[in-house]
């Protein structure tokens, strides 16, 4: 038995190992990193496949991949650098895209691995990839590899949340020789500005059409007025001194071919910058609702038979019923529903149904009283249920209950399975009606002769004796006919006199 458990455990481990391997297929690209960005730097490919990189501050060990198979990274989720030992300086992976924008990842001191996630960026056209360090150092890279995307569906982007793209690494140039941009160890930038100089990022022809604004955030309130601009064109945002961020809204401007962006100061000062990014605003969550004005219930009530039958047609909206319960004032022998229609506003709905309860007016409704009517959607968007002449009253005839309540609400689901409802603020919509017994016969008039007297007592006695039967003999409505109903008639006669 122990051997069997051991075998099962080994099989589970093997399966888990295989699953992990399947989940993350990798492609080694260490060998393509073949040059440095700074002439003072060196890179040596060792016999074990690692690379020894002698770096300077913000130089770079790079791989040029444009117009090569590695220039299209759309099949990969990230690139990973593994180090032989923990880093002693900050590091950064910089992936330069063909539109001159960058995808980057920051690594603090003391890490042995750094990964740059590609996320939702278009990685189909990459110029080059580089590893940078914040200070001069010697670093050994064990290997560099790409991770293939999993075969499953990508994680959906929440359309209600703001999306951002980091541009901080791009802002490294200056327009005035007297200015400097310094990358600090905590990932922020110190910009020593000259009057109307500029800290800039060069893009060539970047397409920012899918974004809504460019934002710069400062570590503390600005000491002077600032300006954020993009070129070509005259799109710019100005801010007075004392702000902690500046935002350039794109609006309807054409931002499909951005050459460069720049942050300027109105006078010589030092600005400490914590973030620079593009932002795409989330859309408000779709809210579905039913239109009470166009939620229409059609039915008719009738009394009498054959040529003496009187029929009254009703067409009431939930908006009308929301004021107070709809009352059927006339004697009712039959209540027949024709159809119910409603309109959903705010988006597409699913699983729309009308819920109804039918119960005596002298008690509370129960789950057993509930009926469900699933609606179907017409080509014009209307949701409808055709009752095909559902006759309700014959199911409700009772010797003890004459007043009834029909209660309704309508429910639906949105694309995420969230339920929305139209239910009169939780009270539901109600129709109150009485059948002809309650409308035409007064209480205690057992023999239905239009008056309450000794003859009604005799009628009850006859029903108790089993020699006759009267539908109104249960005068006190306790669901039985006995001496207490005789007492009830006597009380009615006494009150009348």
Image: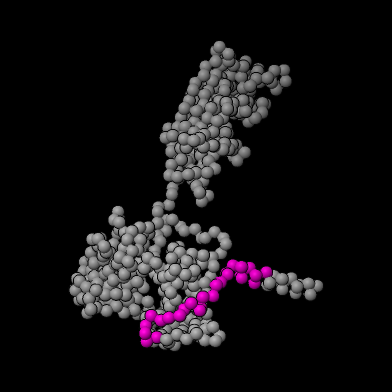
Which residue sits at x=69%, y=70%? 12
Residue 328 or residue 388, whichever sits in front: 388
Q: Which residue lies most toward the right here? A: 1
Residue at 46 percent across and 40 percent down: it is 344
Q: Is residue 400 above or below residue 98?
A: above
In the rendered structure, which segment of residues is drawn in magenta? 15-41
Disc tally is 0
Is residue 176 visible in the rendered image? The answer is: yes
> What percent of the width, then of the height, locates residue 133?
40, 81
- As drawn, which residue projects farthest toward the top? 307
Residue 306 percent across, percent down from the top left: 58, 13
Indicate whether 312 appears above or below 276: above
Which residue is painted at 35% across and 57% down in the image?
Answer: 209
Q: Position of residue 368 (x, y in %)?
A: 62, 38
Please, which colouring scheme is shown?
Answer: one colour
Q: Quadrant of residue 169?
A: bottom left
Q: Is residue 493 above or below residue 72?
A: above
Res. 86 visible in picture: no
Q: Position of residue 333 (x, y in %)?
A: 57, 21
Residue toward you, 379 or 271: 379
204 relative to 156 in the view: left or right: left
Q: Is residue 39 magenta?
A: yes
Residue at position x 55%, y 72% in the image:
27
Residue 311 lies within the magenta run: no
Q: Nearer the viewer, residue 104 or 220?
A: 104
């Amino acid at each position: 038995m122990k051997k069997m458990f051991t075998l099962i455990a080994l099989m589970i481990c093997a399966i888990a190992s295989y699953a992990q391997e399947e989940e993350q297929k990798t492609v080694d690209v260490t060998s393509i990193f073949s040059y440095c960005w700074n002439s003072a730097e060196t890179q040596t490919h060792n016999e074990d496949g690692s690379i020894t990189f002698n770096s300077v501050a913000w130089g770079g060990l790079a791989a040029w991949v444009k117009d090569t198979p590695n220039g299209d990274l759309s099949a990969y989720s990230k690139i990973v650098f593994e180090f032989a030992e923990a880093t002693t300086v900050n590091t950064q992976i910089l992936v330069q895209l063909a539109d001159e924008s960058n995808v980057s990842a920051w690594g603090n001191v003391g890490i042995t691995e750094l990964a740059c996630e590609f996320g939702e960026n278009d990685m189909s056209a990459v110029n080059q990839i580089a590893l940078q360090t914040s200070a001069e150092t010697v670093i050994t890279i064990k290997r560099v590899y790409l991770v293939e995307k999993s075969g499953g569906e990508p994680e959906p982007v929440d359309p209600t949340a703001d999306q951002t793209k980091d541009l901080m690494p791009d802002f490294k140039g200056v327009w005035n020789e007297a200015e400097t941009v310094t990358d600090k160890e905590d990932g922020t930038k110190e910009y020593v500005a000259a009057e109307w100089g500029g800290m800039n990022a060069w893009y060539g022809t970047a397409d920012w059409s899918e974004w809504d604004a460019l934002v710069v955030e400062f570590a503390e309130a600005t000491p002077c007025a600032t300006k954020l601009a993009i070129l070509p064109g005259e799109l710019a945002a100005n801010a007075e001194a004392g702000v902690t961020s500046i935002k350039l809204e794109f609006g309807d401007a054409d931002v499909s071919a951005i050459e460069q962006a720049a942050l300027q100061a109105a006078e010589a000062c030092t600005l400490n910058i914590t973030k620079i990014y593009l932002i795409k605003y989330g859309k408000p969550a779709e809210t579905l609702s039913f239109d009470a004005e166009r939620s229409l219930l059609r039915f008719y009530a009738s009394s009498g038979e054959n040529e003496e039958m009187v029929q009254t047609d009703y067409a009431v909206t939930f908006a009308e019923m929301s004021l107070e319960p709809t009352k059927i004032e006339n004697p009712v022998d039959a209540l027949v529903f024709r159809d119910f229609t409603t309109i959903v506003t705010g988006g597409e709905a699913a699983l729309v149904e009308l819920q109804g309860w039918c119960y005596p007016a002298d008690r509370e409704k129960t789950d057993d009283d509930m009926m469900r009517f699933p609606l179907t959607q017409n080509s014009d968007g209307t949701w409808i249920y055709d009752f095909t002449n559902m006759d309700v009253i014959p199911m409700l005839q009772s010797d003890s209950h004459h007043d009834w309540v029909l209660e309704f609400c309508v429910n639906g689901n949105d694309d995420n399975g969230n339920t929305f409802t139209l239910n009169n603020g939780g009270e539901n919509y109600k129709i109150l009606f009485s059948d002809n017994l309650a409308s035409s016969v007064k209480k205690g008039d057992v023999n239905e002769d239009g008056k309450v007297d000794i003859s009604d007592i005799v009628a009850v006695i006859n029903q108790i004796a089993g020699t006759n039967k009267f539908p109104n003999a249960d005068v006190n409505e306790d669901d039985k006919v006995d001496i207490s109903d005789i007492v009830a008639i006597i009380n009615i006669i006494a009150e009348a006199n």
